[in-house]
Amino acid sequence: MSDDGPRVESGDEILWQLATALSRSFTMPAVTAALVQAAAPAAGGVSSSLAVHVHGSDEVSVVTSSPLGSSRLVSRCVDVSSALPPCDVLRSGLPVLLGSLEDVRQRFPDALGEMLSAGTTARATLPLQASDGETLGALDIEWQHGQAFETPQLRRLDLVAQLAAPALERALRHGSDPSDERELGRALETLPQAYLAIDTDFYVTHVNLHGATLLGSTAEALRHRHLFDVFPEAEGTELELQSRRSMQRKSSVVFEEYYARMHSWFEVHVWTATKGVNVLLHDVGDRHHPDRTLQDPVTANVRLRVLTDVAERLVGADSRTEVFQRLTHIVAPAVADWCTIVTPEENGLVRVAARHVDPALDELAQRLVGAYPHAYSGPSPGVVVYRNNEPLRLDHLVDDIVKDLDDSFASAAYGRTLQLLGDGPGLIVPVSSNEQVQAVITMVRCDGDVFTDDDVALMTDVASRVASALDSADDLHNQRMTAHALQAAALPSSLPSSESLRLAAGYRAASNGAQVGGDWYDAIALGSTRIVLSVGDVAGHGIAAAALAAKMRNSLRAHLFAGVGPLESLIQLNQLVATQEPDAMATIICVEIDTATGAVAWASAGHPAPIVVSNNGTSAYLQGRPIPPIGSANDVPGDRQMEHRFTIRPGNRLILFTDGLIERRSIGLDIGLAHLMILAEQTRAVLDLKETCDAILGEMLPPSHGDDACLLIADFVAVDASGPG
């Protein structure tokens, strides 16, 4: 038994001090402080740490006490895939006992340096499990001297873990985060409106009583759930769009939106929080159902249906043209028999959309699009509305237009088209934003039913929502154009060619095209026989992530061209990122192939390993210890064992990918990986490699996917006769 051993047999008073401290701790900071400061003495050790998986991410938060009696706490984050005892415990749910530095060196060499620096020799890492068996955290205890971990000591360690686990479960599942409480304030709990806070990945971090009631659940059940799991109607709506925009711009916004689940309209306030946004939902159904309207059930139903359609169908349009086209399909038939929309151009108003409820006449209406522009000085009713920015009603719209036309051939054709579409009462409404008319909507009822004051009020309300949709479409369009430019910079314009190595690659942006990601792939030729493949994934979304992806790809290329190999290139890239982009994080895999011999060398910085499909159609997921992700540590170990080697055989296929291809909400990575491997086997016989790549991307990615994804496939089709095997 070591010098530390006798303290394990005694110290009941210290053990009860730990139990007392935990019984009084209800928040994560309090529980963490109690465990980190008191767990080690209770177990006879000198220092301890608590590791907890950060919800909705691949990171593990580790809070450590400084050794030898210091009360100072040190916090850091590591990747859950790291080869460290706490990460291993969180992944497996099994304890790790390391009685000596030799045990550490053999099993977890990445942990050796920090133990030598701390002056500790042995450590035990214990799983802290919830009542349902889920591993919630890992408690790490270290000793100055070697430990034999005999039965009495193991019992003491188990007792410490049994005391710690319920306290951690209570804090994680029922406690509150003080940082959230400081930001929200107690007043939010008593608000009569629904309030919730969501983080940058759209997980609910806080919800008040009214919000929980509105969503049909409890605050405890909703906290740490994904917003679209508990409120699926919000996905793809203005709420999602404005929340993402608020996160990016650090701004606040107020808008109205209809939610079918609640059967009502809500005024939605979104403003930035420390990590994510705050959302306040205020029921304003009365605004959309005034007493005068509700007296007429037919009018009320039409109004509700139109506003609901506008709220649901205009969201997500990524261009002004799409907004107008969608709008015409709402207006006709709900409000009118046919309608047209004009927008201001350099020389006049130009028709950009049209719609008729009669399919035979709708084809005729489409001929108006882009034809017969209206000069700003002309007498057309649409021009009058554009100049005055006020709605206009006409008893016979077509007659009023035709009588003011000149006797030119074009005017005659235009007038004849309008007459064929049908005359009747008309309503013309401007769509304005920032006191500027953005478009003019013209509607006609051929049955003689006049447009009432309620119709004008309805279409004025619709026009205000169209203006908001146009602003959103402009924003999406600008972001999409920027995204395309950044993606073009991050992806190679072509792949190198080789007689013995065939390549194909594909990139798919997230289904929300403006939600740019940081995934990229690359392939470069080094000399006459070597080709290097790389795939990377920069953490986060947005333009900054895409720009950083392009920067990392180009920097990695520079290191590879220097001929230092995959592992050293990743290490040098990490050093560069540590100095120039200290907040950046990325996973990258780099594979060098000698096309003459089939020799392969590869290294991974926290990235999924490659899949190899043999000529007989079976697949294998390569095994090999990665270095930490780029940006997660300033000093990355340069152990050559982390550069892995094998020989690829003729007819073998190599597949590189980003986790966006296999990761889904509520589905484990192992299931996604298995699906990819099955597809890789099923498509092995497809001759065209590009078709194979497109087929795998199409099958793996659902129509609505929240992350971008890359796929890079290499077929080794020949080997030099002098090469091995």
Image: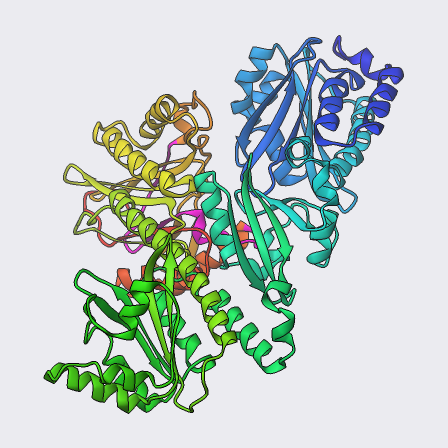
Q: Note whether 312 is above or below 17 in the view shown.
A: below
Where residue 190 sits: x, y (%)? Answer: 75, 44
Position of 370 with respect to 60 (left or right) is left
Disc count in the image?
0
Where residue 246 sits: x, y (%)? Answer: 48, 44
Q: Quadrant of the N terminus?
A: top right
Q: Was residue 470 drawn as part of the magenta stretch in this picture?
A: no
Name the residue rendered at 42%, 82% in the picture.
336
Q: Note whether 716 is above or below 313 in the view shown.
A: above
**Quarter occupied by residue 89:** top right
Where residue 207 sits: x, y (%)? Answer: 68, 46
Residue segment shown in magenta: 643-668
Decide if residue 578 is in sight here: yes
Foreground pick, 376 / 21: 376
Name the residue rendered at 78%, 13% in the picture.
5
**Quarter occupied by residue 33:** top right
Q: How is the image coloured?
A: rainbow
Position of 166 with respect to 626 (left or right) is right
Name the residue rendered at 66%, 13% in the picture.
72
Foreground pick, 349 / 136: 349
**Residue situated furthest left in the rendering:** 408
Q: Note whether 478 is above or below 119 in the view shown.
A: below
Foreground pick, 625 / 580: 580
Where residue 628 sits: x, y (%)? Answer: 46, 30
Position of 632 with respect to 507 (left or right) is right
Q: Was residue 667 drawn as part of the magenta stretch in this picture?
A: yes
Decide if residue 321 is in sight here: no
